[in-house]
Amino acid sequence: MTRLTDKLCVVTGAGRGIGAAIARRFTDEGATVIVTDQHLDRAESIAHEINATAHRLDVAVGADWDAFAAAHPQIDVLVNNAGITGFEDSFAPQDPENASLSDWRRVHAVNLDGTFLGCRYAIRAMRVRGRGSIINISSRSGLVGIPGAAAYASSKAAIRNHTKSVALYCAEQGLSIRCNSVHPAAILTPMWDPMLGSGAERMARLDALTADTPLRRFGTVDEVAGVCAMLASDDGAYMTGAEINIDGGLLAGSLSPPVPAD
């Protein structure tokens, strides 16, 4: 499929995981892709693999976005994917009672401020043509409470709401710039490896962590990338302000276990 031919697409946090999968899928769909990441070596590695352009970008820093805008003043698609959980550098408490203000602010700076700055840049970069697609990666955690990751859940919930504000603003301006949010649940990426381990116990841990998921498995980065490709393309032309859950049915309701046959 080449649904993204002639489209210039920017993906943040694309040096690995979901962002890298989105960059690969967009390239497969015919797009010209700019791979951005706070770690330039990661961005360059993915860019080299898919014949794309790499750019260092710390999404929480306004000056970085200004420099990026100067280099790329016009685009067709932006995926605001870059984000952190708060547990990257330490296992300090992230619950509502014990989280530090500095940790709270850091998570919001990357996840929420980064999305705000990205959306602001994209609107300006898409205004010339009057059309485009902004895709904000939120999370299942933006739809339900997460006691042990309060800042992460708060930031992802705010991304969900800001997506709708951007969608309505662009429509109000008479622009065909669509903005939608994607809400993955447990997607199997390298960040899970420390918890899952290896060897014989890995499968048991996988099963335990997905026991409450109706489809009984983790999602894949390619499944998230597929949804993003649809939203970036003209197949999603009548979708704006929408939210798409990629959660294996987790938010559909309580799962009724199958009744054993007699």
Image: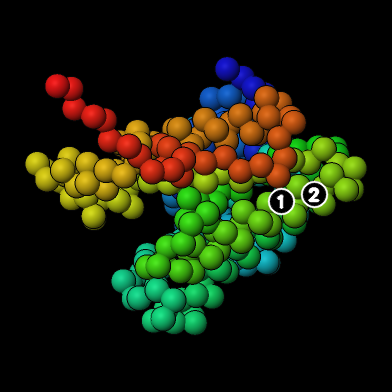
Would you place residue 165 above or below residue 33 in this image? below
The reply, left or right, for residue 52 in relation to residue 219 is right
- Kindly identify the residue that appears in the image at 35 percent across and 76 percent down: 93
- Kindly identify the residue that appears in the image at 51 percent across and 35 percent down: 225
> Image quarter for residue 162?
bottom right
The reply, left or right, for residue 145 in relation to residue 52 is left
Total labels: the figure holds 2
Is residue 152 something that shows in the picture? yes
Image location of residue 45, percent across then percent down? 44, 43
Would you place residue 173 above or below residue 149 in this image? above
Quadrant where the N terminus sits is top right
The reply, left or right, for residue 68 in relation to residue 107 is right
The reply, left or right, for residue 237 in relation to residue 144 is right
Q: Tell me the number on the disc at residue 168.
A: 2
* Pointer 1 residue: 164
> Image quarter for residue 96?
bottom left
**What separation in Å lies between label 2 and label 1 (alpha carbons)?**
6 Å
Image location of residue 262, percent across then percent down? 14, 21
Amino acid type at image mark 2: Leu
Helix, strand or loop under label 1? helix
Q: How is the image coloured?
A: rainbow
Residue occupying the far top of the picture: 1
The one nearer the camera, 88 or 159, is: 159
Image location of residue 260, percent across then percent down? 18, 27
Determine contact: label 2, label 1, CB under 8 Å: yes
